[in-house]
Amino acid sequence: MPAERFPVEAGHVMAFARAIGDFNPVYHDATAAAATEVGSIIAPPTFVQASAHFDDDYPLRPRPGVRWFGSGAAAPAPKEPDERAAPAPAPSSGTSGGTGLHAEQHYTYHRPLRAGEVLTVHARAGETWEKQGRRGGLLTFREGITEYRDTEGAPVVTARSVSVMTSQTVRDPA
Amino acid sequence: MTASTRAFAVGDVHEAVVVDGLTRTQIVQYAGASGDFNPIHTDEVFATQVAGYPSVFAHGMLTMGMTGRMLTDLVGDGRLTRFGGRFTAQVWPGDTLTTTAAVSGVDERDGERFATFDVSTANQHGVAVFTGSAEARVDS
């Protein structure tokens, strides 16, 4: 399940903007942002992806009581080549629409998303389809639609993602 | 960037380098900010020895985030109305990415003006890693 409640915090927006290499003051400086057209700190266009932090069951983050699948002192045992799937234990990702590698992402912006807002997250599965991969192996595509709404229930961002599950390690998804 | 003050015309092509020599540290920084710690992005031992990749590689959403920065620098803060696309190739440490946004349309709707863009981000070999489109509210 994706997060149900997503508080958009100013420090989180700043850290996210830094990570994508965007040092625009509208993402971290309240005084500078007040003088812009939008008038306050807003979030970058892809920020809602970070709602994963508020999903208690998000599988791509180490969680208490769940053995993490990455390396520690040693790597986990390699899989047989024909069992290799990417990502390895195929965890389900609520914010990327299913399992496997991220193939597509589409956003509709109903208005700017502002730091300090608390969004509610409404996710549903979309379509599923299959396609033969270029290097053999069946590709399974899954669509997920997530609507982020404000406290009035009005949509702020609508996200549509497509993920692809492959039967072998891929160099070029989709 | 503040408001968009540019005039956009169909056929205009805008281009910017969005990362020059991607570092593993930036990939980890994105993992921390986004919450996606998948070891194929954050753990070289896992990525190479378990998953069978030549190294860790960037989250598709890091590429899209960097691409989005080019667009917001171009059209102004909070002006995107749509942005989307496909991840067409993986992005590796050391890659230099350039985003191109070509104006594909300019339309009036409900008294406002919107520009649409064909968007593509390519690596230093000219291989597209993200292709899509965007729409933004622009000044009349």
Image: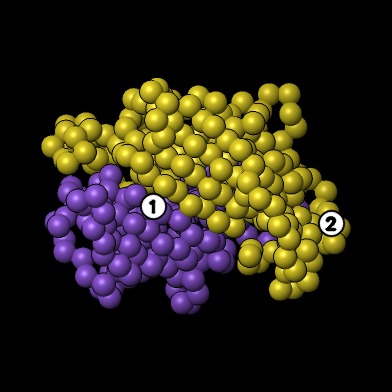
Chain colours: A yellow, B purple
Q: Amino acid at mark 1?
A: Arg
Q: Amino acid at mark 2?
A: Glu
The residue beneath circle 1 is B82
Q: Which mark is residue A15?
A: none
A32 sits to left or right of B73: left
Pick the front one: B115 or A171: B115
Chain for numbered disc 2: A
Residue A128 position in % (x across, y down): 69, 52
Query: Element type at marker 1?
Result: strand
A20 sits to left or right of B86: left
- Name which residue lies at 16% across and 40% down: A36
Quadrant in the rendering for residue A29:
top left
Mark 2 crowdedness (10 Å alpha carbons): few <14, some 14-19, many ≥20: few
- Of the 4 image quadrants, the one containing the C terminus of chain A is bottom right
Q: How many marks?
A: 2
Foreground tag (2 vs 1): 1
- Name which residue lies at 26% across and 72% down: B10
Residue B24 position in % (x across, y down): 51, 53
Q: In this rendering, does residue A104 appear at all?
A: yes
Mark 1 crowdedness (10 Å alpha carbons): few <14, some 14-19, many ≥20: many
Residue A48 position in % (x across, y down): 45, 39
The residue beneath circle 2 is A83
In space, the residues marked 2 and 1 are separated at their CA atoms by 38 Å
Residue B43 position in % (x across, y down): 63, 48
A93 sits to left or right of A88: left
Q: Is A166 drawn above or below residue B46 in the view shown?
A: below
Pick the front one: B70 or A150: A150
Q: In this rendering, does residue A72 appear at all?
A: no
Chain for numbered disc 1: B
- Name which residue lies at 39% across and 65% down: B119
